[in-house]
Image (cartoon, rainbow, N blue to C red):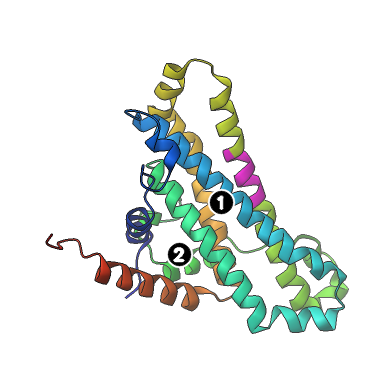
């Protein structure tokens, strides 16, 4: 059975918690305030997101040098999907970690229920229905709409558009962190991190990450890979670490 994003967030938080056991910097700070831990968590997630955006750029850059025949063959290959499935997995983990660590509630006006209540398949179907790619210049050049290379160009355009939006979202998180570092008074930083204002700043970004994660999964048909990956991981994790295990 598929996990919802809320269940996935809980699983990821349990498996990879932001605590003193996993991050020695937190161990060395006595009585770490929750706001300081949250800022550290967002900072670490930002680094993972930056790495993931870099992986997408590393994937896309060589495609500009390919002939259309090679490009079409590569984008339809198992190798290509395996690479992007790993990218989607990293993006998914970072997105749900951000939602959990900063206590966010991403909201979409087109939905009747919370994003967190949806499974990956439901989210991908929602994004496909409500956030289709405009394809910009590809839709404005009549010859391309009848060209045999159109589908290849459209797929490459979609991946590039996802990369742009993820780059923008990562940059906004970087600015959020930079602004927090500018304040020399630790008490003010803690008060801000604990205020609803900080969550309102980050929730649209979490939504942008979630939508583009779903767009990547949908456009490359990666849902089966990720569902199997996380279902197996969750099964193995709870088999080895049952919640009610007696000591």
Q: Does residue 172 show up magenta in the picture? A: yes
> Does residue 106 show up?
no
- Element class at badge 1: helix
At horizontal 80% and vertical 75% (from top left) the residue drawn is 145
Which numbered circle lies on residue 48? Answer: 1
Main SS of the magenta part reads: helix
Residue with the mark numbered 2: 123
Measuring from the top left, give residue 85's x and y in whole percent. Answer: 56, 71
- Element class at badge 2: helix
Query: Which contiguous range is marked in magenta?
Result: 166-173
Query: Which quadrant does the N terminus fall into?
Result: bottom left
Residue in the foreground of this view, choosing between 184 and 176: 184
Query: Which quadrant does the C terminus fall into?
Result: bottom left
Classify 37 as above or below 15.
above
Left or right relative to 88: residue 122: left
> Does residue 140 show up?
yes
The mark nearer the N terminus, 1 or 2, is 1
Measuring from the top left, give residue 147's x and y in whole percent. Answer: 84, 80
Q: Residue furthest left?
A: 246
């Amino acid at each position: 059975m598929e996990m919802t994003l809320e269940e996935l967030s809980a699983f990821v938080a349990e498996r990879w918690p932001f605590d003193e056991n996993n991050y020695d910097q937190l161990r060395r700070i006595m009585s770490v305030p929750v706001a300081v831990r949250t800022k550290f968590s967002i900072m670490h997630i930002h680094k993972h997101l930056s790495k993931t955006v870099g992986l997408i750029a590393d994937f896309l850059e060589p495609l500009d040098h390919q002939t259309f025949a090679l490009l079409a063959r590569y984008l339809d290959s198992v190798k290509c999907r395996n690479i992007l499935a790993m990218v989607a997995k990293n993006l998914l983990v970072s997105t749900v970690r951000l939602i959990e660590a900063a206590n966010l509630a991403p909201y979409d006006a087109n939905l009747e229920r919370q994003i967190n209540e949806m499974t990956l398949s439901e989210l991908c179907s929602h994004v496909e229905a409500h956030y289709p790619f405009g394809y910009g210049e590809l839709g404005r050049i009549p010859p391309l709409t009848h060209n045999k290379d159109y589908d290849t160009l459209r797929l490459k355009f979609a991946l590039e558009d996802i990369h742009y939006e993820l780059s923008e979202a990562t940059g906004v998180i970087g600015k959020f962190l930079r602004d927090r570092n500018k304040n020399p008074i630790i008490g003010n930083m803690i008060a801000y991190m604990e205020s609803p204002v900080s969550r309102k700043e980050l929730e649209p970004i979490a939504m942008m990450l979630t939508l583009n994660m779903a767009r990547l999964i949908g456009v490359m048909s990666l849902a089966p890979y990720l569902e199997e990956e996380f279902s197996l991981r969750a099964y193995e994790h709870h088999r080895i670490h049952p919640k009610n295990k007696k000591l």
